[in-house]
Amino acid sequence: MTAASVRQVVIDWLDDNYHFGDAERLIGSDDRSFLKNGILDSLGFVKLIVHLEDTFKIKIAIKELRPSNFDSLSLIVQYVTSHRDYRAV
């Protein structure tokens, strides 16, 4: 998967689970903070992490669960695509 495909997986998940087709509009900029702008709450982040691990067959260490890795769409895409276990197909 390309970075664009990873991005779309996250958008689709947000649409299916939280924003019902409106995620991309609510996010606006890929650098917009999910926490500060109410895109996801703490439980939503837990569910998203599980989804990322299942979808991309990666293991996210607890020490890596911080806003600098997951607080925006661009940070999530960057984290997933640079993860040691990620396999672009």
Image (cartoon, rainbow, N blue to C red):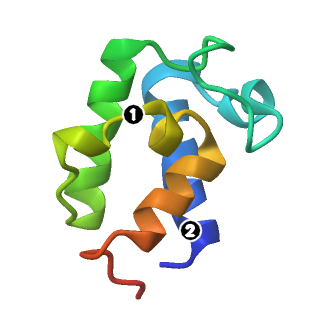
Q: Which element type, helix, strand or loop, lies under badge 1?
A: loop
State which tag comes first along the sequence, 2 or 1.
2
- The residues bearing labels 2 and 1 have C-alpha atoms spaced at a distance of 23 Å
Residue 58: assigned label = none
Residue 31 x %, y %: 74, 41
Q: Residue at x 24, y 75 (%)?
A: 85
Q: Which residue is mark 1?
A: 66
Looking at the image, which is closer to me, 6 or 86? 86
Q: Quadrant of the C terminus?
A: bottom left
Give the mark count. Answer: 2
Above or below — where is 60 with respect to 88?
above
Along the viewing direction, whichever of 21 and 71 lies nearer the viewer: 71
Residue 5 badge: 2
Q: Are marks 2 and 1 in contact (CB under 8 Å)?
A: no
Q: Relative to residue 77, is residue 17 depicted above or below?
A: above
Q: Which residue corresponds to the image point at 49% horizontal and 20% vertical from the top-left?
A: 18
Q: Amino acid at mark 2?
A: Ser
Relative image position of residue 33 (x, y in whole percent): 66, 27
Question: As drawn, is 85 to the left or to the right of 3?
Answer: left
